[in-house]
Image: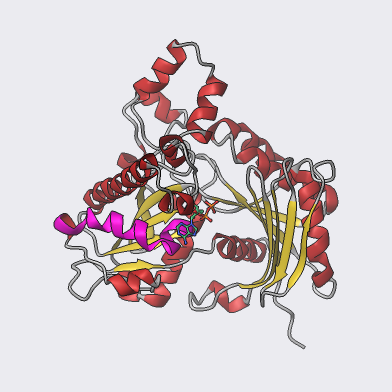
Amino acid sequence: MSTPHPVILVVNAGSSSVKVSVYTVPEAAHENADINPVLSANGQIEGIGVAPRLRASMADGHVVADESFPVSQVSDHDAAFRLVRLVLSIGLRDNPPVAVGHRVVHGGSDFSQAVCIDDDVIARLEALIPLAPLHQPHNLTAIRAVRKAAPDLLQVACFDTAFHAGHDMLAQLMALPYSYYERGIRRYGFHGLSYEYIARRLTQVAPDLAEGRVIVAHLGNGASLCAMHGGRSVDSTMGLTALDGMPMGTRCGSIDPGVVLWLAQQGMTADAIQSMLYGESGLKGLSGVSSDMRALLTSDEPRARLAVDFYALRAAQEIGKLAVTLGGLDALVFTAGIGANSPAVRSRICAHLETLFGISLDAGANEENGQRISSNGSRVPVLVLPTDEEGIVALSTARIMRECGRR
Ligand code: ADP
């Protein structure tokens, strides 16, 4: 009898939500990029501490739970995780998970690939909290919650920074006194799990392009762009923290560092500045309407339009910058919530790229979120590829298990 494929739980703990996905990973997926991890179920709690709502479904769409809870029952991430796990465990009795893979935002300079979690790893991840204050604490809470519930279960941390670990020094530097670089104050880059997935997916759908110079625009609530050559990251728009680069739902993106000095000189505390730059800026701050792109695109408020125009211009400017690093551009890929679903935003960004890059879109393909949305005459092909960060976490976790001889 053949051994069943390992079942991996993937945990993605955000600031107000915990998502848990159940994957099986075929052995062949490690050698063959055409074979993917298979999602069998997922569940999530949103609105932790505010208005908790649990939803869980099987991969075929069958809903197994959809329920709201009083805040007192799901007041923190620990409680949220226990609940999601409980619901998903119903389908896992015959084939329980052999490992848990966590999406962890910051691996700093210590971690250039996924790693088995032990006490030392936890201590190092704790030290990185100031560099990812909105995400890292929740990632650690989920890791501790799993430890408490199943102390012997193998846990693996998969980092959003790791895909960018091979960056040339020029891509890592900021023009501060050099001693800061030596202390780890560098441009790391984020959304690496998404970019790793897209690099893998490109080898499936357009192997010729995958070899070339590709810019991927990950446009979700968080947003960044990555320059890849031959499937490897060579530069990214994000820096030491996930604040840098283009504006996002609530984060400011690149601003003059003098603004931060000015705010501090006006008497704002570091915590207050942090809250504003991470939570009150970006599309939300500019529009005064919403951080949600769908709401802005349907709003009549002039400032909603201004925010979207600024967003599109900044994305295009960052594409220009990354194309300089790459020395040209062979393909542009859009992904994540906005990138994969918003024809309006894609066409506004691409309109800025027409003269310089000869990019033009096929209006019909763009409207339908088709896989190739550039026109036949476009000098650079433009693709839309939905991302799967959780699938990459499942794959990396299964790989680490093989390496540690746990399977
Ligand atoms: P996260 O970074 O939290 O994973 P997502 O990748 O899900 O976020 O992206 C969320 C963003 O995607 C929101 O701004 C949402 O409005 C936007 N979005 C989702 N679907 C559409 C759509 N059809 N048109 C425009 N924007 C969309």
Specify whether residue 215 is in view: no
Q: Residue furthest bottom?
A: 1
Quarter of the image for the C terminus: give it. bottom right
List x then y, in percent, for residue 170: 30, 40
Specify whether residue 202 is in view: yes
The residue drawn where x is 23% and y is 57% is 351
Q: Residue furthest front?
A: 300
Question: Which residues are the magenta region?
Answer: 336-355
Give the number of marks: 0
Q: Residue furthest left?
A: 355
List x then y, in percent, for residue 84: 77, 57
Residue 146 in the image: above or below residue 378: above
Residue 90 in the image: above or below residue 166: below
Q: Is residue 274 magenta?
A: no
Q: Is residue 353 magenta?
A: yes
When asked about the image quadrant of residue 186, the answer is top left
Q: Which one is in front, 257 or 70?
A: 70
List x then y, in percent, for residue 25: 64, 72
Magenta: main secondary structure: helix
List x then y, in percent, for residue 71: 80, 42
